[in-house]
């Protein structure tokens, strides 16, 4: 009788553990689909989580957009190392000897995140390439790269610019949010000499760390075991780990100057990530913290400070 009772108890425990494991895996799969798979992500959800009030900046953005779209521009394409067709919008300027390649944020696209800054760069004589990162905009891809895969795509675009504009071209990389993580992760790679500097606006350190923060702050859910299960799923489906590439580690190998920009009021990607990245940068570095600015709001919250920081940074390259 005792043996039967122990077997029955063990069976219940195994059943309970299996049910819990299945529930946890189901929850991880749910968050994974909503976060990593192109057709499941929603820009409205991202804006809500980020908490930035864009309505007050819309008149300025629309004014810049009208001027921007009057400029000569074309659709351009390159192919990633894993065979995806990648899209960018090219705004040539003069002989195109100064070019900024712009990388947008999560669930956005190139022609959205850089409308405001187009006025600054075009007036400074920069040609602009506004890329759609993989699984965004008109670029192909099912799974979002969160900088880990996009950094290799960025190198493709750098070489595209060199081929189009010539060996004497000076290239600046500018990224916002996920795009900022992308350009910082690029800094750890062997870059062509034409890349003169990197500008990062509100970058996260790694997908794992920013997801952990969002789970706790937005959903009030512990990261374990969702992150571990999501990492397992992502390695199987997308081919990379969520902490495989960390901007705070990659910048330790950086050789080009880096400007970091972040808002102290950013609750989506905490400013502490910017400070940790800054401490680790091996190359010449500068940092601008905009008081009270929310996620990706720095340029609009204090345009003068942002443009002054850019001008000073570019002038020193």
Image: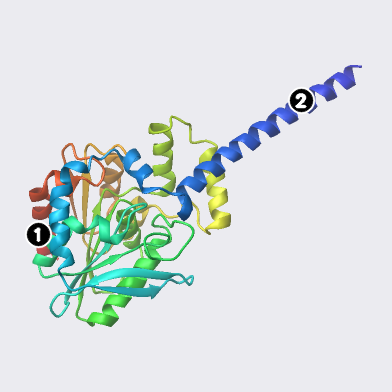
Q: Residue at 58% across / 55% down in the picture? A: 236
Horizontal relation, residue 76 to residue 1: left or right: left
Would you name the residue on which mark 1 appears? 311
Q: What residue lies at 83% left-to-right and 21% top-to-bottom?
A: 6
Q: Which mark is residue 229?
A: none
Q: Earlier in the sequence, mark 2 or mark 1?
A: 2
Using the image as rendered, state which of residue 306 and residue 209 is in the foreground. 306
Q: Is residue 28 above or below residue 95?
A: above
Residue 88's place in the image compared with 203, above or below, is below
Vertical relation: 68 (above or below) 232: below
Left or right: residue 270 compared with residue 55: right
Task: Say whether residue 288 is visible.
Answer: no
Left or right relative to 40: residue 132: left
Viewport quadrant of the N terminus: top right
Q: How many marks?
A: 2
- Mark 1: few, some, or many residues within 10 Å (few <14, many ≥20)? some
Residue 34 can be seen in this image = yes
Q: For label 2, count other residues whose C-alpha is less than 10 Å away and answer few (under 14), some (14-19) or many (20+).
A: few
Residue furthest out toward the top: 1
Residue 138 location (% of width, % of height): 38, 65
- Mark 2–mark 1 Cα distance, whole angstroms, equals 67 Å
Q: Quadrant of residue 88?
A: bottom left
- Colouring scheme applied when the structure was drawn: rainbow
Res 217 → quadrant:
top left
Q: Secondary structure at mark 2?
A: helix
Image location (x, y in percent) of residue 222: 48, 32
Image quadrant containing the C terminus: bottom left
Nearer to us in this view, 205 or 219: 219
Q: Position of residue 314 (x, y in %)?
A: 13, 63
Q: Which mark is residue 12?
A: 2
Q: Residue at x 16, y 54 (%)?
A: 62
Looking at the image, which residue is at 50% across and 42% down? 31
């Amino acid at each position: 009788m005792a043996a039967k009772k122990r077997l029955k108890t063990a069976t219940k425990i195994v059943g309970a553990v299996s049910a819990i494991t299945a529930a946890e895996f189901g929850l991880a799969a749910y968050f994974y689909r909503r976060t990593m798979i192109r057709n499941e992500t929603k820009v409205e959800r991202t804006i809500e989580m980020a908490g930035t009030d864009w309505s007050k900046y819309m008149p300025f953005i629309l004014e810049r957009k009208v001027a921007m779209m009057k400029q000569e521009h074309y659709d351009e394409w390159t192919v990633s190392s894993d065979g995806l067709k990648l899209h960018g919008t090219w705004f040539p300027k003069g002989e195109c000897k100064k070019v900024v390649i712009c990388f947008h944020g999560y669930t956005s696209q190139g022609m959205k995140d850089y409308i405001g800054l187009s006025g600054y760069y075009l007036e400074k004589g920069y040609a602009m390439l506004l890329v759609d990162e993989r699984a965004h905009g008109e670029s192909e891809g099912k799974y979002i790269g969160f900088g880990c895969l996009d950094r290799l795509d960025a190198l493709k675009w750098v070489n595209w610019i060199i081929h189009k504009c010539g060996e004497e071209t000076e290239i600046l990389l500018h990224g916002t949010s996920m795009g900022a993580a992308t350009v910082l992760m690029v800094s750890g790679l062997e870059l062509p000499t034409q890349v003169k500097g990197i500008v990062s606006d509100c970058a996260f350190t790694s997908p794992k760390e920013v997801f952990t923060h969002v789970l706790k702050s937005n959903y009030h859910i512990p990261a374990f075991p969702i992150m571990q299960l999501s990492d397992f799923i992502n390695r199987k489906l997308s081919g990379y780990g969520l902490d495989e590439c960390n901007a705070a580690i990659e910048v330790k190998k950086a050789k080009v100057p880096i400007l970091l920009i972040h808002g102290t009021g950013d609750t989506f990607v905490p400013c502490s990530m910017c400070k940790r990245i800054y401490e680790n940068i091996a190359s010449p570095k500068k940092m601008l913290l905009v008081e009270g600015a929310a996620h990706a709001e720095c340029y609009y919250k204090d345009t003068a400070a942002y443009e002054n920081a850019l001008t000073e940074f570019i002038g020193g390259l």
